Amino acid sequence: MKRQVADPSGDAMAPDHPDDIAFGWVARLDRGALPAEEQAALDAWLASDMRHRGAFIRAQAIWLSLDRARALHAPPPPPPAIAPAMRPPQGRRQMMRFAAAAACAALVVPRRSQGHEHVWRTTIGTSAPVPMPGGRLILDRDTLLMGYVEEGRPLEARLLCGRVWGDWTAVRSSTPVMKAGQTLIFPGAASFVVQQSARVTEILVLAGAVRTDAGSQEWTLGTGQWMRTGDGMLPRTGTLSADEMYRRTAWSRDTLELRTETLAEAVAILNLYNHRRIVVHGAALSAQRLVGVFRLSDPSGFVRAVCAILGAEHVESPEKIDIF
């Protein structure tokens, strides 16, 4: 698979299905016009297979339907943006994968009698904390989360795509059950991260313990343990150090931590979290390596610091920041 052409998300695990890839492009386009390089990549992907264009059209229709559902039914929106949707039947595995399933369910499935579904969606940047019984969730960029809500409290949550950080301060009987892919997650008094990408689910426990049900197997993960599972693959587990866990969750603290990454690599991450893009001019400058901690949501501050470190110049406009 030609990941550089097909996958606009930049995630380590790229979608491997045309509908997944198409939805990634539509989500990216929702933020604004594509830079020339990304537009060329999209055009090449569409031209490479006639099925890609059909998937792209379906993804656009579903995305617009989700927006219409939110506009017609949403109450005054608390952060992040919330769109009411309907609950999909428990046995449905795919209407269209991940976000497509959420949007289609919003249009065709009846509501429960005493509650309702919400869809939390992020595009650029992370969400404000989403309160849950006994805890809270923070959504990373490009994330779709469905939640069944009764009396203002989410009782169930399903991660369709993206990444969430959860923090439960106490074990409660009303703690929501989470589902990501085909994996059920039962958080106790724990802090954890769940990522859903294509058909792969990753769970990392930062503190406490989390019980999971991955098909025919149950697992209990403790502090520092991770599990990766998905359709057609056996679950894999491992352990991370406290330092590595802290670094992998930097996004939830609005932090970019660099350990000799190149300027080009750092800018690529920042551009995923901000509407105001950074453009680096010159291969030598792009290859300069950096060490430090910066705010993800402050591209201007990052550029000023980098220019002072590297002796570079920059020009700012409302749409972008050029580094020379």
Image: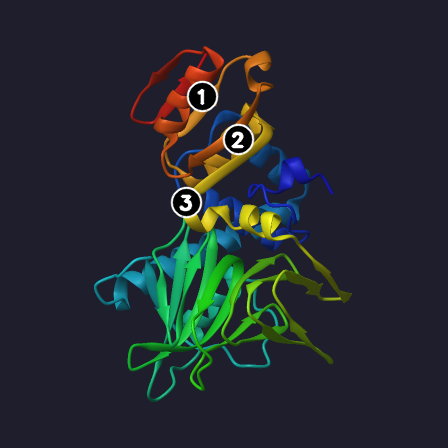
In this rendering, the answer to whether 190 lies above or below 10 is below
In this rendering, the answer to whether 11 lies above or below 186 is above
- Nearest the viewer among 134 and 315 is 134
Q: Residue at x 44, y 76 (%)?
A: 170
**At which x and y percent is residue 16?**
68, 51
**At which x and y percent is residue 144?**
46, 60
**At which x and y percent is residue 293?**
47, 34
Whether residue 103 is visible, yes or no, is: no
Say what secondary structure mark 2 lies in. Answer: helix
Q: Residues within 10 Å of mark 2 (few under 14, many from 20)?
A: many
What is the number of the mark on residue 266? 2
Q: Is residue 81 left or right of residue 61?
A: left
- Nearest the viewer among 194 and 317 is 194
Residue corresponding to mark 1: 306
Q: Is residue 122 left or right of residue 200?
A: left
Residue corresponding to mark 3: 254
Q: Residue at x 64, y 36 (%)?
A: 5
**At which x and y percent is residue 277?**
41, 29
Q: Residues within 10 Å of mark 1 (few under 14, many from 20)?
A: some
Whether residue 324 is visible, yes or no, is: yes
Q: Residues within 10 Å of mark 3 (few under 14, many from 20)?
A: some
Report the amino acid beneath label 2: Ala
Q: Is residue 66 left or right of residue 259?
A: left
Q: Earlier in the sequence, mark 3 or mark 2?
A: 3
In this rendering, the answer to whether 144 lies above or below 291 is below
For this orientation, the residue located farthest to the front is 242
Distance of mark 1 from mark 3, alpha carbons?
A: 18 Å
